[in-house]
Amino acid sequence: MILVSGNLFLLNTDHTSYAFCVRDNRLLEHLYYGASVPEPREADAFVRSLSHKVSHSKGTTINYRKDSPLTLEDLPTEYASVGKGDFREPAALLVFADGSRSADFVYESYEIPDEIAELEGMPSALAADDEGVSRLIVRLRENQKGVRLDLIYTVFPASDVITRRAVLYNDTEEELQILRLMSTQLDLRSETYKMLTFGGNWGREMERHETVLTHGLHVNHTRTGISSNRNNPFVMIAEQDAGERAGSCFGLNLVYSGNHYEACEVDSFGGLRFVSGIDPEGFCWKLNKGDAFATPEAVMTYSDSGFSGISANMHAFVRRHIIRGPFRDRPRPVLLNSWEASYFHISEFKLLQLAKKAAQAGMELLVMDDGWFKGRNSDNAALGDWVADEKKLPGGIRRLSQKVHGLGLQFGIWVEPEMISEDSDLYRKHPEYAMQIPGREQSLGRNQMILDLTNPAVRKTVIASMRAVFKDNGIDYVKWDMNRLFSDVYSSVLDKERQGECAHRWMLGLYEILDTLMKEFPDILFEGCASGGNRFDLGMLCYFPQIWGSDDTDAIMRTKIQSGYSYGYPLSCVSAHVSDCPNHQTLRTTPLYTRYNVAAFGVLGYEINLCDLRKEELQEIALQVEMYKKWRDVFFAGDFYRVTDKEWMVVSKDKRRAVAMIWNELNVPNDGALMLQCRGLDDEKTYHVCNVPIAHDLKEFGNLVNMVLPVHVRQNSLLHNAIAKFKHMDGETEDYILSGAFLNRAGIELAQSFGGTGYEGQTRLFQDFASRMYYFEETGGHASL
Ligand code: DGJ
């Protein structure tokens, strides 16, 4: 809800309030962002109590106007520029035709439009009409030059999110240059904050980092050209003592996939300014008279329930307002991907062998990954030539997809449309399509170059080549990959004074391509990918309902990576696969059930050579898929909780069903009791809680079998193998009927863990990398507690 009263603007979501006012001098002053405040009876009293009090000039500050002691240096504002005494991080930095940079944007008017239009040319959050989404546009004008600036606030009440963006209109007679134009600015009064950022690298995306915000500038950004795995654009600012379940926190993100910038500056008066938007480094935009420049949309949420409150808000927002199209609420198919099964060595024969096994295991989609097109036998060649390799696929894509459909599976394909290989027909014909600086050797990444998507001819070619692949070939799913960062950024179709626009124009070019193809192929499920999570952001999620979280399929690494994503993104958009062991990235061996348990807390898939597996493994996988299908709606749409650093839980929206998972890293003998803690259950409901006992292989006990056997058995001998084949040890059973109130508060002490002193059926074998899944179902039965 948006309230405008006198000079006060108050934006309310269900549990938060955001307020600013217009001061006497027509400056926008930020007043408040936090938990909901009561609607003011008198706007004036509200403004008077929160607005900055000034009676004398301060120290060596600059007076904003000759006739007033007010300085901008410690005034919380809505959108700061430079040159008038505010020395903190600016939101706007412009160079006018005369070379001057001072800018002074003051209030002119506001508008609350009836229609909430989408941003043109860039992805933005969708207003779902049943949720009371509303928009405020505040119009500012530069005092002397006359340039106009719109600040656009959109309020999403149910998810407690407010989005912001800015549009600069050059309605003057002269051109100007934009050196930075941030999407949002947030001025907070306290200095006792920390900033949480999520970054890493290939194979270890989304590590959580905490920085105590002391005096000075703290920046999370990327200059890689894409949002990148180095520093994800999602950040949190939290009070220093805030934690998972309590404390004041802000969650901030950008609906953008290019170079981004999130900066916190603690100033010398103890205030904290946050700005975020397109990374100003390397950015420069010439704005001709009559032109406008729109920033990407920034997303902000507040919660006083710690990180979990931010995650809940962000999950609701992403699910409802970012993900769109027919797949938004549709649980996703369980897939088998060919990459780790065969890498580039694929053929119709091999893929059909895999597909048969996948169908037998109950899977629903076969994905043909990289290697299917002409000349693509390694990552050295062929990107750009999107025609099937006749040797590998003699009847083309269509014949393969028909055969896969005939097995009762959907068919998916891998593409990397934004790239070009030097060794490709496309490059031989159109070397100018590659992004490179004339006369300078282009640095390569994964042996490939980036197509210059600022060039309309290149965009046309990409759209046409993808159309040819997607159309009439029986494609149900596309994995859209992107495997290198930017270097030698340059566009041969831009003038030299516009090269600073190249990276952003490239991203706008990509959005245009995606927009065209998504509209043309609404029934294809698209999955984003960039060497795993190198471009995992809200911009991409507007086109791709799911993104491949990481090339690292090791279950233990995935617990960390998926936990990292879960702070800002619902796990229903992070795809996760069960792969082979030793794992291809870590060479670690983890139990098959742990690999499944971790991947099920994402969009489940398999990326493993089913043809090479033992019969027992295939049976186990078939049971996993069967179980997943029964619980898929809970994993997909439920509320997710990071219960501890080794326990996740997901609870269905109606709170009738839930699943929890605990896992172990390195086993410790003689350890303390392990509690199953619960979150999010309905206090009033009664739940049946149980596990599916694991049948342990005798060989897990190694030599210890000799403690119970009448004859001596040498480890790994024929006899040992034979006994192990027929004799399994039943794992522990957990079975309780308990109330939600009891579970939410007290939990369950789980069976004793094996500690080197004996084993019987109720002992929990919790070796390195073991895990357990617990299922909760509402029961009509009576809870004893
Ligand atoms: C990188 C992706 O992340 C992998 O899953 C796989 O698709 C390869 N590219 C194929 O080249």
Image (cartoon, rainbow, N blue to C red):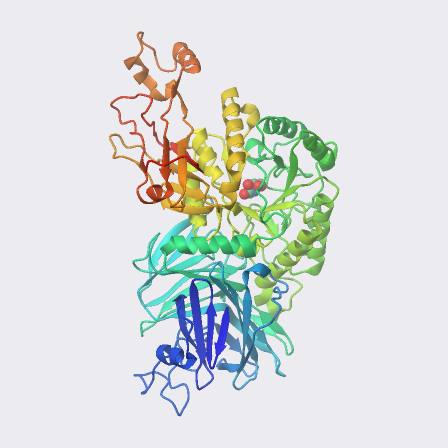
In this rendering, position of residue 334 left or right of residue 700: right
- Residue at 48%, 38% (x, y): give it: 599
Which of the image's four quarters has the C terminus? top left
> Outermost residue, bottom direction?
67
Q: Position of residue 35 (x, y in %)?
A: 39, 64
Q: Quadrant of residue 650?
A: top left
> Outermost residue, top direction?
711
In this rendering, position of residue 782 left or right of residue 335: left
Q: Position of residue 409 (x, y in %)?
A: 65, 33
- Residue 231 appearing in the image: no
- Whether 342 is drawn above or below 256: the answer is above
- Residue at 61%, 39% (x, y): give it: 370
Front-most of residues 451 and 771? 771
Front-most of residues 385 and 405? 405
- Whether 165 is drawn above or below 427: the answer is below
Q: Quadrant of residue 191?
A: bottom left
Front-most of residues 440 and 542? 542
In this rendering, position of residue 696 left or right of residue 436: left
- Residue at 35%, 31% (x, y): give it: 768
- Residue 726 appearing in the image: yes
The quadrant of the picture showing ligand 1 is top right
